[in-house]
Image (spheres, rainbow, N blue to C red):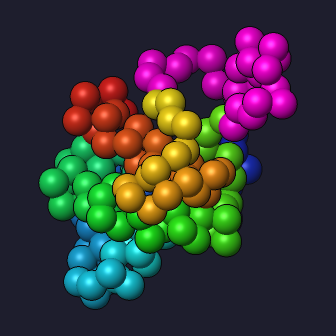
Amino acid sequence: ERDRLNLRGLVPPRVKSLEEQAVRVMAQINDFPDDLEGSVEANKFLQELHSRNETLYHRVLCDNVEVLAPLVYTPTVGHVCEHFGKQFRRARGMYFSVRDRGLFSSMVWNWPHDDVHIIVVTDGSRILGLGDLGAHGMGIPIGKLALYCAAGGIA
């Protein structure tokens, strides 16, 4: 696998099991302070993990959904959404605008994955009592989708 992905020499030689990696991730999560700032930082950490290693992210979330739910969704996600534009790393959803009316069907073909099991749709308005956050509200469906997948066992 390392040769196929051109990773030989770029990662340490020791291979850790998914379970060992999950324990390490939870140890790092537990090191964040137990306050709003720590929760926001833990959320960022989890977002970065999600971008780097989706398999590990979903394993950790499935195994620790009760502990991690407040970090990936309410109450932390409201604050994260207020700053979503500054933290944006990569697309984790699709954006449909009134200007795209009539093009929605063709737009879904732009999604880079064919094997879609679940979607979350929102109009982005009145998010968690914060008002209309527009595109910054994308954190809500991202968090919901992660929790739905973990709770539904489809991660």
The number of numbered discs placed on residues in the rendered structure image is 0
Q: Horizontal placement of 77 versus 150: left or right?
A: right
Q: Is residue 44 magenta?
A: no
Residue at image point 30% right, 64% down = 75
Residue 54 visible at all: no
Residue 55 percent location from the top left of the image: 43, 43
Q: Horizontal placement of 78 versus 148: left or right?
A: right
Please identify the dominant SS of the magenta region.
loop
Looking at this view, name the residue that lies furthest to the left: 66
Residue at image point 45% right, 19% down = 117
Residue 35 percent location from the top left of the image: 27, 84
Looking at the image, is 24 positioned above or below residue 20? below
> Could you say which quadrant of the image residue 96 lies in?
top right
Quadrant location of the N terminus in the rendered image: top right
> Could you say which quadrant of the image residue 113 lies in?
top right
Q: Is residue 98 magenta?
A: yes
Residue at image point 31% right, 35% down = 148
Quadrant location of the C terminus in the rendered image: top left
Residue at image point 58% right, 57% down = 133
Q: Nearer the viewer, residue 152 or 127?
A: 127
Residue 152 percent location from the top left of the image: 25, 28
Residue 40 visible at all: yes
Q: Horizontal placement of 69 versus 122: left or right?
A: left
Looking at the image, is 111 positioned above or below residue 134? above
> Could you say which quadrant of the image residue 99 lies in?
top right
Looking at the image, is 72 positioned above or below residue 154? below
**The residue stretch that appears in magenta:** 95-119
Residue 77 percent location from the top left of the image: 40, 61
